[in-house]
């Protein structure tokens, strides 16, 4: 049976999904983004203990990402406003030139938090770019994706849908 778009009504117009009849469950999502630096910029950033002229890069990215998670419903039209219960970031260099940003979001609600996790990872990555662009404009934000999701109809593990 083919899946259908949930944000389109029978007449083809956009709509917000009605979650009124759904069961509130613990919903968790993990997303990541990658920030790729030119080698010289990565070396300089690491030599400066991940601080730029604008301040502490990682701490600022975590704050910006957290604010974005909490405001996702203001940015993406059909996202429901949620009382976020957990928002956690892991940000680390996974190679000499690549920074991995992971954002985990959780809530007990009738709808999931995939968009919140992806928004958090994206905005944290954009903040890293903004904080480091004086080092290079060749920084690349890549591979923003959902890694894991649980608590709703479908589970996603390592980017693959289960169920």
Image (cartoon, rainbow, N blue to C red):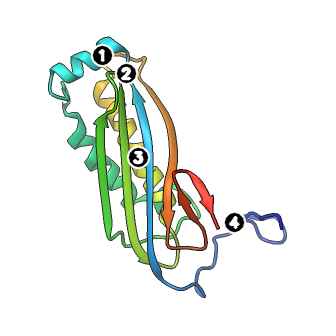
Q: Is 85 or 92 nearer to us in this picture?
A: 92
Mark 4: secondary structure? loop
Mark 1: secondary structure? helix
- Residue hosting label 3: 121
Of the numbered discs 3 and 1, the one sitting upstream in the chain is: 1
Question: In the rendered image, which quarter contains the N terminus?
Answer: bottom right
Nearer the observer: mark 4 or 3; the answer is 3
Q: Residues within 10 Å of mark 3 (few under 14, many from 20)?
A: many
Circles 4 and 1 in contact, beta carbons < 8 Å: no
- Residue hosting label 1: 41
Disc 4 versus disc 2: distance between alpha carbons? Answer: 37 Å
Disc 2 versus disc 3: distance between alpha carbons? Answer: 17 Å
Position of 113 relative to 159 (above/below): below
Q: Residues within 10 Å of mark 2 (few under 14, many from 20)?
A: many
Mark 3: secondary structure? helix
Q: Residues within 10 Å of mark 1 (few under 14, many from 20)?
A: many
- Residue hosting label 2: 37
Circles 1 and 2 in contact, beta carbons < 8 Å: yes
Of the numbered discs 4 and 2, the one sitting upstream in the chain is: 4
Q: Which residue of the protein is positioned furthest toward the top in this rendering?
A: 40
């Amino acid at each position: 049976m083919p899946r259908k778009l949930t944000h389109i009504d029978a007449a083809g117009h956009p709509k917000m999904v009605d979650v009124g009849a759904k069961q509130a469950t613990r919903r968790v999502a993990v997303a990541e983004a990658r920030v790729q630096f030119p080698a010289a910029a990565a070396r300089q950033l690491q030599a400066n203990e991940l601080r730029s002229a604008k301040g502490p890069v990682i701490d600022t990215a975590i704050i910006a990402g957290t604010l974005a998670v909490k405001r996702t419903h203001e940015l993406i039209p059909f996202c429901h406003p949620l009382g976020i219960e957990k928002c956690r970031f892991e940000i680390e260099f996974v190679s000499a030139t690549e920074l991995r940003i992971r954002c985990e979001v959780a809530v007990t609600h009738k709808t999931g938090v995939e968009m919140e996790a992806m928004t958090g990872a994206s905005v944290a990555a954009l903040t890293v770019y903004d904080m480091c662009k004086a080092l290079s404009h060749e920084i690349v934000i890549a591979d923003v994706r959902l890694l894991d999701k649980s608590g709703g109809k479908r589970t996603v593990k390592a980017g693959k849908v289960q169920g």
